[in-house]
Image (spheres, grey):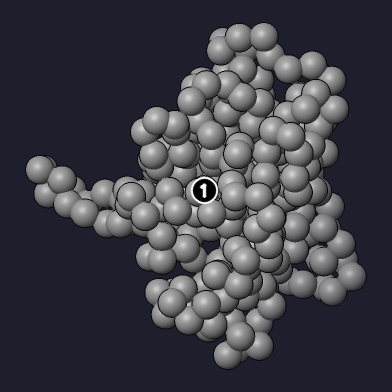
Amino acid sequence: MNTPQWVIVKGSVTGPSHIREGVTNQDATLVTRLGTGAYVLAVADGAGSRSRSDQGARLAMDVIKGSAGDWFGTKLPADTAQWQTAVRMYAEHCLTRFDSRIARLVEEIRTEERDPRTAADIRGDFATTLFAVIAAPPYFAYFAVGDGFLVVSRRPGGSHLLQAPSAGRDNAGETVFITSRDREAHLRPLVLVDDRVRGICLATDGLIEATLTLSTDADGEQMFSAPAEFEGYFNYFAKPGVDPSDLERQLQSTQFAETSGDDKSMIIAVRP
């Protein structure tokens, strides 16, 4: 998708382990432009071990798109404080809508399929992570549930990991899903205000090993970062005439497949 302001490319491929097992891609992505000119970018990663997680990921994208129009479709917040309030309320609204949709599906499953499990157990079948960004430079509002990650490119300054995948895990190191009971404790709506941001990249956790660097800080804590090479993604797609499908081909490459068996999804938005 190309506009005078942005070049936006997205790719989503089935992970090698899912291909071997005959499982479909359980990720989902969203790119849409609102009437205000703001863009909504989102990725969701359905839990591989859950039977309806692909449906949960697609439903999350539907909710993100539908709710965005209510909060950012006709008028954008005027300042940082208003953006902070709006993205918090937007995130809560999205989760509430998701819950309502899932509740109806759960009742249908219990009735039509005579599933004897509890509603909470069936709800867990739809487990998925979620990462959404509202881009209206210089404002970038975002929220996440789970271990997706966000990288921004600044000029000058290069690429920086704005939200690490570890932020979406609980104290036991387990991924938090939007179907998890404790999701609110891990929901952190945030706003970045920076007129030097020229690119953003959202990705699911299947791309952690392929694109990020893991190092140890002075206190012995492990931390992720975006290596200098990450800037190459933004530079490449900022060039005129580049084939957007090049991103998906990269995600399907042997180089990436060797790093993780998971599905891999990425959205890159860059201002030339």
Residue 98 figure quarter: top right
Q: How many marks?
A: 1
Q: Position of residue 220 (x, y in %)?
A: 12, 49
Please state if 182 lies on the left or on the right of 66 as rendered.
left
Q: Residue at x 46, y 73 (%)?
A: 256
Q: Residue at x 78, y 42 (%)?
A: 32
Question: Which residue type carries mark 1?
Answer: Phe
Residue 178 seen in this snapshot: no
Q: Position of residue 96 (x, y in %)?
A: 72, 37
Please state if 111 lies on the left or on the right of 262 as rendered.
right
Q: Which residue is mark 1?
A: 234
66 is higher (above) or lower (below) than 104: above
Q: Position of residue 254 (x, y in %)?
A: 48, 81
The foreground one among 152 and 52 is 152
Please state if 268 lies on the left or on the right of 68 as rendered.
left
Mark 1 lies on a secondary structure that is helix
**Hey, which residue is sitting farthest right in the picture?**
112
Q: Residue at x 73, y 17 (%)?
A: 76
Q: Quadrant of the C terminus?
A: top right
Q: Residue at x 81, y 66 (%)?
A: 110
Residue 242 seen in this snapshot: yes
